[in-house]
Structure formats: C-alpha cells, structure tokens
Image (tube, grey):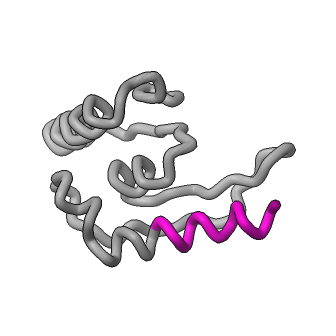
Amino acid sequence: MDEPFGALDAMSRDNLNVELNKIWLATKKTVILITHSIPEAVFLSQRVAVMSARPGRILEVVDVPFAPMRDLELLGDAVFGDVCSHIRRFFKQAA
C-alpha cells in the first residue's frame, strides 16, 4: 500500500487506520505500507523499516512493542511517543 490515506483529513485517516488494523487482525495477511507519517507507521506496524533518501536504503528496522489490537488511545501513550521520536531522529540526522 503506497500512501493509501495520504489525501484524507486527520479524523478519516485515523478511522481508516483502525479499520485496517481490524482487517489485518481478521485476515493475518502480510501488508507492506509506504507512508511519510511516522505515527501512522507505528500505529499500523509490527516493524517499521526506516529508509534513507536517495538511494533508498534501510537504515534500521524498529520493532513496535504493542499488542496487535490497537485503538486510537494508543496515540497518546508515552511509549508510542518514544517510538515515534526514535524514528524521527533518523530524519534529523540526515538533514
């Protein structure tokens, strides 16, 4: 999936992220999601591959430490913020 919710408003995007999580829980299909949204990547993923700019290379694979069933309350969790901050540091280093 390449930026599937990129053109949506924040509330619709959040709701569809919850729905996608439910679909994944029901089907257990492998999904590769491309997004520029760090919180979206952390919310939807079991692992996040952080990539460099051109040429695109994987800099690190970050394991996401949350149970597979997720709801929007997770976005306010301190550990969620820590994981997002850890990933964001890669982009600050590259600038």
On screen, residue 52 above or below 27: below
Q: Nearer the viewer, residue 28 or 69?
A: 69
- Taking the spot 35% from the left edge, 69% from the top edge, the residue there is 80
* Horizontal side, residue 79 vs residue 71: left or right: right
Residue interval drawn in magenta: 84-95
- Taking the spot 14% from the left edge, 39% from the top edge, the residue there is 26
Q: Residue furthest right?
A: 55
On screen, residue 3 above or below 66: above
Q: Quick check: is 85 in the magenta stretch? A: yes
Q: Quick check: is 5 in the magenta stretch? A: no
Main SS of the magenta part reads: helix
On screen, residue 87 above or below 42: below
Q: Nearer the viewer, residue 11 or 4?
A: 11
- Taking the spot 38% from the left edge, 25% from the top edge, the residue there is 8
Place of residue 58 in the rendered image (x, y in percent of width and height, measured from the top left): 70, 56
- Taking the spot 64% from the left edge, 66% from the top edge, the residue there is 60
On screen, residue 28 above or below 48: above
